[in-house]
Image (cartoon, coloured by chain):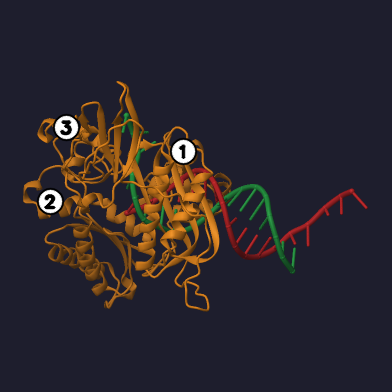
Chain colours: A orange, B green, C red
Amino acid sequence: MRQVASVLHLDLDAFFAAVEQRDKPSLRGKPVVVGGVGGRGVVSTASYEARKYGVRSAMSTREARSRCPHAAFLSGRFHAYRTASERVMAVLRETSPLVEPLSLDEAFVDLAAARLDDLEIPTVTALAERLREQVAEVTGGLTASVGVGTSKFIAKVASELDKPDGLVVVPPGTEMDLLRPMHVSVIPGVGPATTERLRRAGIHTVADLESISEDELVRLLGTAHGHSLHHLGHARDDRPVVAERETKSVSVEGTYDTDLSDRKLMAALLTRQARSVSERLRAGGLAGRTVTIKVRLHDFTTLNRSTTIGSPTDAPTTIGRLAVALLQDLDTTGGVRLLGVGVSGLADWIQEDLFGETVDDEVDAAPDLDLDAPSTAGAKTTTHTWAPGMDVEHAVMGRGWVWGSGRGVVTVRFETAETEPGPVRSYPIDEPDLKPWRPEPVDGATVPDMHERHR
DNA sequence: TCTGGGGTCCTAGGACCC
DNA sequence: TCTGGGGTCCTAGGACCC
C-alpha cells in the first residue's frame, strides 16, 4: 500500500450497450441488452435504462426478456468494442506507460510511472478528469467511471462508488473508513461461496473481517485465500500494476440450445473447436503440451479431462484427436449442453526435429464423419441453413419435422416412413454467421412461409 | 428448457524421484 | 518386517473475475 493515491482504475460504463447506443441513435435513451440471444444465452451488458427493470449481467437472456420485453436484444459487435477499447487504452498509455487492461472495458493505470509534478490529491484529480474527457473524445462520447487510491483494491472500489460517469479519489489514510461499513463481497476474491462461509461465521462487513485473526481466517478459508483476505480486509494491498501478462491457456467452448446425445456429433464439434484453438495458438505464436476437454452435462455438472504430451503442439489434428480420445472415456448419457477444448502448458516455441518438421505425437485417428450426408434408414432428409441469432424457440415447424439451431448446430427431426417422428439428430454447420436463412423443402414436405413462422 | 465464454488461481491426491 | 521427507509433475475440481 502506497503513501500516495497513485493507482487509477478506469471502467467504461455499460460498455457494450453504450457502443450500440452511440452507433444507433434510435437506441439512445432506451433499454439495450447485449449478450447471448439463443435459448441459453446470458446478458453481457445491460444499458442503464434496462437496469431499471432489473436486468443484470450474467442473468439469463430469457429472464431479461421477461423483465424487460421491450428492450433491444443484441448479440454484440466485438470488432466495434475492440476498436473503442484500443482507443481508450491508447489514451491511458499516453498518461502512463504502466497500464494493465483487465478486459475490454477496464484498466489500471500506475500514476507513479506517469510524468507528473506530484501525486497530491488535486494533481491526480485533475489528471483523472482530463482522462475522462479524453475518453469521451476518442470514443465519440462514451463515459467512464474512475477511481483513484493507494492500491488496486481501493482504486477499484472507488470507481464503483459514483457510477456511471463518476470520479472518486480516496485520500491516503481514509481507506478503512470507506471500507468498514461495506459488505465483504466488495473484496476481490470474495464470491458467493466465500460470502456464505463468512456469513456462517458471522462475518458480514469489512469491519467484521477486520476484527478476526489471520489464523482464524486461514482456518476458515485455507492458506492462500485466508492470508489474502486478511490483508485486503485491512486495506493492505501491494499488488503491482503489471502491463504485460503472458497467456497461460487458450480455449474454445460452446453451449448448445438443445442437449447433444450423438457421440459422433460431439466428436465432430470437438474437432472443429480444436481447429479454432489451433488457429488462435498460431496467431499468437504459441503451442502447448496439455489438451483439456470440458463437458457440461444436462444437469450442469461439469467434467474436465486432460492429457499431457511430451512436446508442445499447435496442430489442429493433434489437438482434435486428443480431445476426441478424452471424450471416449466419458459417460454422456442424459445429454451434453456444453463442449469445450483448451490447450495449456504453453511455450512460445515448438520443438522441431532434425528435418525441420514439427514433432507431432502419434494419436489414434478420429472417426470420419460426413456431416453433409446424414443417412437414417427410411428417413427423408433436407438441407437447411442457420440464421444468426436463431434459437430453438424460433425452430421451424415443418410438416412432421422440426429443425432448430444452437450456436453453429442445426437439429433435425427426420420424418420416417411410419407416423412416429424420427430421431432427433444434430449437425454442425461451418461459419454459421455467414449463412443466410433459406430453408429448402424436400419432396412431399411443406415448409411454411418464413413470415408465418415468426408470428 | 434457469445458469455464456474466456480466462486465472488454488487445492488435493497420487506418481515418481532422490 | 517398517517406514523418512522434500520436490515436482500431473490430473480433476472448484471459486472467482470480467
Q: Chain of mark 2?
A: A
**3D distance between C-alphas at marks 1 and 3:** 38 Å
Q: Is residue A178 left or right of residue A292?
A: left
Residue type indicated by callout 2: Gln
* Residue tagged 1: A301
Name the residue: 11% across, 54% down: A22
Give SS at disc 3.
loop
As drawn, A140 above or below A448 = below
Residue type indicated by callout 3: Val
Mark 3 and mark 2 lie on one chain; the one further toward the N terminus is: 2
As drawn, A22 above or below A101 = above
Name the residue: 33% across, 40% down: A374
Q: Is residue B3 left or right of residue A318?
A: left
Q: Is residue A430 left or right of residue A339?
A: left
> Looking at the image, is mark 2 or mark 1 nearer the viewer?
1
Mark 1 and mark 3 lie on one chain; the one further toward the N terminus is: 1
Residue A355: percent from the left, percent from the top? Answer: 50, 78
Would you say the residues marked 2 and 1 are in contact, meaning their CB atoms lie under 8 Å apart? no
Residue A209: percent from the left, percent from the top? Answer: 47, 47
Q: Residue furthest top?
A: A419
- Co-location on one chain, circles 1 and 3: yes
Front position in the image: B10 or A344: A344
* Residue tagged 2: A21
- Co-location on one chain, circles 3 and 2: yes
